[in-house]
Image (spheres, rainbow, N blue to C red):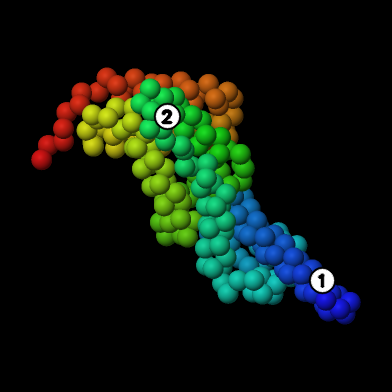
Amino acid sequence: MERGELGCYTDRMSRQINKERTRHRLLQAVLRTIQRYGHGTLTTGRVAELAGVAQPTFYVHFRSMDQALEQVAEWVAQELGPGLHPDASAELDRAAYVLEQAVRKCTRSLVRDRQMAEVFLNNRRDQTSALGRRWSVLTGSLRERMRQIVVQVRPDASPADAALHAELLVSIVFGLAEAHLDGRVDDLDRAAATASRAIVTSILTSSPVADAA
């Protein structure tokens, strides 16, 4: 590559990097606006101001606020998704331990980034927004993963019992995350262990009654 071509390539790369940085600042500003003021206060002007750019710059990166919200939802899903996908175990004697680790991992993943956690927990039931819809998918995936682990703890559990305990585990993850963020639970690992052991006891003592046809 000639020196002139190298210079042009370097300039293009620098512009692309700066463009990506600006886009990311705008996405962060959308998230921060929702956290501080609520979903209904989003305006391109407020987002641009928080991002430290001129308002027209918003439209260089997004066609509309709806598109920006879709991309924020995807970004947060990518950040939180791996933590909300606990490992399963094919070894029955380790299944209870895996369940406890799943609760701990998911809860810790949620509270790692306070801003994301608060926006997620506050908007997870809002099906009118891209955020709520995207996070419903994450929650459904977590629920199914927990159900699989419950079945490993108790292979003869009825579908209803497995679904019930999976729902309880999801509620525990969200509840512990909120309690930790609010300062009501300091020792998150102990809380996760205590709650998950109670669920394991319930799973193992439930009557394996098949669902009514």
Instruction: Determine whether, in the image, residue 159 is placed left or right of residue 72.
Output: left
In the orientation shown, which residue stands out farthest toward the front?
Answer: 1
| Comes first in the chain, label 2 or label 1 | 1
Q: Residues within 10 Å of mark 1 (few under 14, many from 20)?
A: few
For disc 1, the marked residue is: 10
Residue 98 lies, in percent from the top left, at 44, 29
Instruction: Determine whether, in the image, residue 210 is placed left or right of residue 57.
Output: left
Q: Toward which corner of the image does residue 64 lie, by quadrant?
A: bottom right
- The residue mark sitting in front, 2 or 1, is 1
Residue 162, placed above or below residue 43 = above
Instruction: Determine whether, in the image, residue 206 is placed left or right of residue 28.
Output: left
What label does residue 99 carry, if any?
Answer: 2
Looking at the rendered image, the quarter that the C terminus falls into is: top left
Residue type at mark 1: give it: Thr
Question: Element under label 2?
Answer: helix
Query: Looking at this view, is 96 or 206 the one in front?
Result: 96
Q: Residues within 10 Å of mark 2 (few under 14, many from 20)?
A: many
Which residue shows up at 31% across the image and 33% down it? 151
